[in-house]
Amino acid sequence: MHPLDVAIIVTYLVAVIGAGLFFARRQHTTRRYFLASHDVPWWAIAASIVATETSTITFISVPGVAWAKGGDFRFLQLVLGYVVARILIAVFFMPWYFRGELVTVYELLQTRFAPSVKALAATLFVVMRTIADGVRLLLTAYVLTALVGHLGVTGAIIALGVVMTLFTLAGGIEAIVWIEVAQFVIYIGGAVAAAVVLLGHVGFEEALAAGAAAQKFRVFDFAFDFTKTYTFWSGLIGGTFLTLSTHGTDQYMVQRYLCTANPRSAGKAVVTSGFVVLVQFAFFLFIGVLLFAFYRDSAPVTASDQIFPHFIANHMPPGLSGLVVAAILAAALSSSLSAIAATVVGDLLRPRDEQRTMRLSRVVIVLAGLAQIAVGVALQHTTRSALGTALAVASLINGPILGVFFLGATKRANTFAALAGMSAGLLAVGIVAFATDVAWPWYAVVGSVVTLGVGLVSSHREINSAP
């Protein structure tokens, strides 16, 4: 890699740590450390939400979806559910979040159920997020080593993990949000730079003609087939339930809403982010069409995830190549460590003293960072299994947690019903995920519906069996 590109990448990583140190001056209370004192404007939260859900695998894989043989724009059907769910969250969930001084979303469960339900949901979140973000470090390390060379996967994982841990430890959620705003600008800039270079090679009209001839611009598939990943129904229904769980009951996202001043601002942020994601993914898919037009029948790789990194490494000019690599790193460094610390300290340890809470929070951030690095290092020799593990864990957890929040909104559900429902939901979605060919967008539907149904039945039977 050209020295200019290396300098850009190093400068970016140093700037991230520097930003964390800049915000460290104000991190003296948990209200500031975990909630940014509710001072962050809604537009910054919107950018942070988009950056949070745009991982390296998204940045790399979505163009590959359109480039691949038979690939097209049907992936966008999933985003329909993303938008619908965000509107529902803004209307129905946001007022719930801002009743009282909420630190984690799981505190809401204790208003309806015994502490054991909150503890179970919080523990599942911590485990799932640690594994998922460890895999994200691993996947980013693979891309980084493919582009930079001679770095080593283990070294890349450790370097990325240390940077992520340091800026989170110093600056708290305030640093995370503002760094994610910068990350959003950087990775969009990197994608635009790649698109401009591609257009310089193939031309806009030529790309459109090549894409149209290969039916790359097809968007809708109305087949009601549970085994197909991208259909109108899996996108609208599965995408809605998936986003209700990931953006409505996951502390990783909800913590960002709580950094705003009120539910109206948070609602504007989450709805706006949905339309930005729609445009963003359409643009990423168009880059895939440009790659298809550029390579035609002479593609040098077999896996769709490899095509964009190959172009970056071999056809981007110096400077722009470094910008795109920095964009990939930006997509990887959306830290979940603050959300994990808030959950562990606030929902599981619950210290009473403010100073002790701050000390414990910083210890948890370091330990969680080390755990995510360890996950990435441990799984580096089994790439497919690592990704499959992350998706499986997420699918097992998101739906049942959403289901127990639905139970909490009912009047008759009790603690026994909540625990029974979550257990049944975890079992059901595990069976569907590992013993059937049902596509993953339906997993959250299965987990949440079974949790709600079994919880309601269990509550009814307990009421009827009471003396």
Image: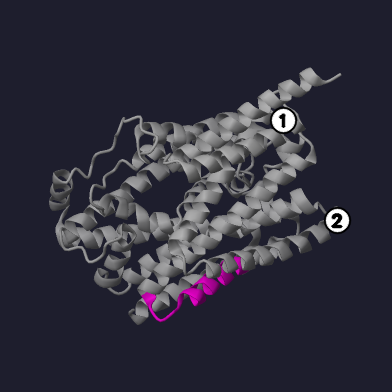
The secondary structure that dominates the magenta segment is helix
386 vs 119, left or right, is: left
SS class of the residue under badge 2? loop
Give the residue number, with chain letter if any, for mark 1. 417
Magenta residues span 148-166
Work out whether 353 lies above or below 153.
above
**Residue where numbered disc 2 is placed:** 353
Q: Position of residue 95 (x, y in %)?
A: 64, 32
Specify the amino acid type for callout 2.
Asp
Quadrant of the rendered structure where residue 79 is?
top left
- Horizontal side, residue 121 vs residue 357: left or right: left
Residue ID at (51%, 64%): 137
Cα distance between the residues tagged 2 and 1: 34 Å
Q: Residue at x 35, y 40 (%)?
A: 230
Is 163 one of the magenta-colored residues? yes
Q: Residues within 10 Å of mark 2 (few under 14, many from 20)?
A: few
Residue 336 appears anywhere in the view: no
Left or right of 158, for residue 214: left
Q: Residues within 10 Å of mark 1 (few under 14, many from 20)?
A: many
The residue depicted at 15 percent of the width and 56 percent of the height is 203
